[in-house]
Image: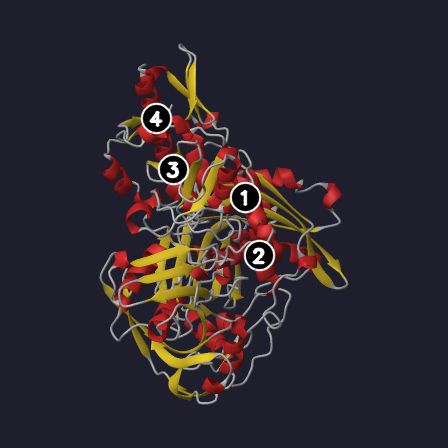
Amino acid sequence: MEKTNTDFTRRTFLKASAIAGGGLLLHFSGLAKSLLAERGIDSVAPEWNELTGYIKITSDNIIKIICPNPEFGQNVMTSLPMVVAEELDVDWKKVIVEMGPHDNTKLGPQFTGGSNSMRMYWKPLRQAGAAARHMLMQAAALSWAVPVEEITTKAGEVYHTKSGRKGVYGDFAAKASGIPVPKDVNPKNVKDFNIVRHSQKNVEGAKIVSGKPLFGLDYKHEGMLIAMPVHPPAFGLKLKSFDASQTLKMPGIKDVFTIKLYEDGFEQGGFDTRTFNVILAVVGKTTWEVMQARKKLVVEWEPAGDVTNTMQGRGGGKREVIYPGELESTEKQMEKMREYASKPAQQLRKDGDPETAFKNAAQILERTYNAPFLAHNCMEPMNFFAHVTDEKALLVGPLQAPGWTQPTLAKVLKLPADKIEIQMTRMGGGFGRRAYGHYLIEAALISRQAKAPVKLIYSREDDTTYGIYRPMYTATYRAALDEHKNLIAFHVKGGGIPEHAIAANRFPAGAVDHYLAEGWEIPSNITIGAFRAPRSNFNAAAEQSFLDELAEVMGKDPIEMRLELLKRAKENPVGKNNEYDADRYAGVLKLVKEKSGWNGAEHKKYSRGVAAYFCHNSYAAHVVDITIRDGQPYVERVTSAIDCGIVINPDAATNMVQGAVIDGIGNSLYGGLTHKDGVVAQNNFHSYRIIRMHEAPKSVDVHFVQNDIDPTGLGEPPFPPVFGAVAGALYKATGKRYYQQPFTSPQPVIPTV
């Protein structure tokens, strides 16, 4: 049995497990109230006994587990507490789950992103649950005057078999809360799990389907006003002047003013990206009144010129980032990328002598892949509530990274951190977009200037045209073959606006004797940020498409060709910095081949594509089946194989993969943003094409590799290989290779200013 040392006091325990600590009890959920009411307990002020930070138990045996991480549909509000409940050894049906507030000391960064929730919290949560269980056993042993070694637990009850005594956890909660955190805790053997690895329903599922107010847009506060932003219509412009005289005459309008997010020289953190530093705010009584009043504003804009930001560099220190002042257009961006691609680039990795190998090659395959900017398109547009006074600030809303936003907020408002309270609502989508907290800062500054509680709301157009997109990418792949069509060298050179997507140490690095990876970047004033599986979403699309075409040139089955390369990477790897585990990578390919019936005659009516990829510590593979109906391609079925270590909640994990697959299909076929003189062409769903319900596959059959590896992440890894699998299936259906995303939708008409 695994053993973990926990030689801390209660105070140091909370500090040591800051990334997964406790939380203050702010309110009771509907489930909590109903459970309390069922048991005839006063739901207003029960006596909660806190154990190991995030476990609270009443003397009447109500068990509450606090979820530390923000929830935007990935189901961490269920899966994280499941880990605690497993080690605590309770009946899951009797557990109440609540979202904790932001708390720097107890909950640490509380960051949802990078597929890190389960990976980051797995050990601390197990430790906390096991420690609390042991404290309850000690309390029972003291109460019954028996050795703690004779105490056992099961489903929230404590037993002393020799004397026949038993009791519920609530009987011992008060005494247990005064016991020091034990030095040594033995978590369960993973083979003994009865909550983890078993499907549990979403703890907020009933509230979601019945329309309960869970999201930021639902939040209400007494005396709350509505604010909406007005930002420049084009990247590279800034506010020159405005006339709000007609706006202020509109019904319900309270004020119109400018706010400046960061003062000159402000050192920005990693998630302090914002596109426009000065914006207009229209404040009024209702959303409709504010939306109508904004139309009456008379605003004059002017060129912003080059803008220099001071950013925190990796590993500390500062770096200067220059955003050029030009008004960018898609055609010019493409021209510039072609120009940069022809120049020498930064060498990211080199194995062997690729130059000589290509010079002596019997055949060279070379292909270039391009992808546009992508918008996140969260169903719930950006919003946040703020009530800021000279003494304190309350903020409530959807946010992925409260721990990294609060320090910036404290500096901007000039308030100590302990005077700032951030409560997190459920998010209507995030995908990386809500890691950037500028909209929270905007709400706080508007509230302070308006001297009132304010909810800032972006319209869909505000959100889509603001920026912080998936970058625009390109990459050229080359493969050198000998006279027997053996792969002897591999070269990838990629760039983008304003970053490249090349992951130099991932497959097929390590599987080819002669290998070269290079990258280049073009500065831009179009702001970018994390987009589900950042960089990997493009890199996988291009790399897997190229490997598919390479397999055809080599006369090999695309799965078998990949498995041969992975066999080489396992048995005789090239280089020492390979990020991936060749066995796990091969495992998902073998599983998807088996489960899809890859070469089965019964699937001949479909055009099939396959792709696999490693990112964010996990492995994913998909087989996509396409048919052509009325001249249009439809993804009919998808078979997925995933290795993410231990699967906490199988049904929820399956749902997450299915969502990633549909998201990937939609983005690969339809997604794209274009610009003309800095203006975004696609400002809402009528012009920014997303997948529609009838276009979703009829089935997404998900299979997980079964192992006892600690969880390695799931939210991001299934997304990237979808693009390559779709491209491969399209080729089989149409006879045409696809090098430009979106694959089937022409780029929309580029507007004029």
Cα separation, mark 1 vs mark 2, equals 21 Å
Residue 312 at least partly seen: yes
Q: Amino acid at mark 4?
A: His
Which residue is identified by label 2? 663
Which residue is identified by label 4? 134
x and y, in percent, of residue 699 in the image: 67, 47
- Return the residue found at the far right: 630
3 or 4: mark nearer the eye: 3
Which residue shows up at 26% across the image and 42% down it? Answer: 15
Q: Amino acid at mark 1?
A: Asn
x and y, in percent, of residue 520 in the image: 39, 66
Q: Amino acid at mark 2?
A: Asp
Q: Earlier in the sequence, mark 3 or mark 4?
A: 3
Q: Amino acid at mark 3?
A: Lys
Which residue is identified by label 3? 56
Residue 588, placed above or below residue 108: above
Q: Which mark is residue 202?
A: 1
x and y, in percent, of residue 516 in the image: 40, 56
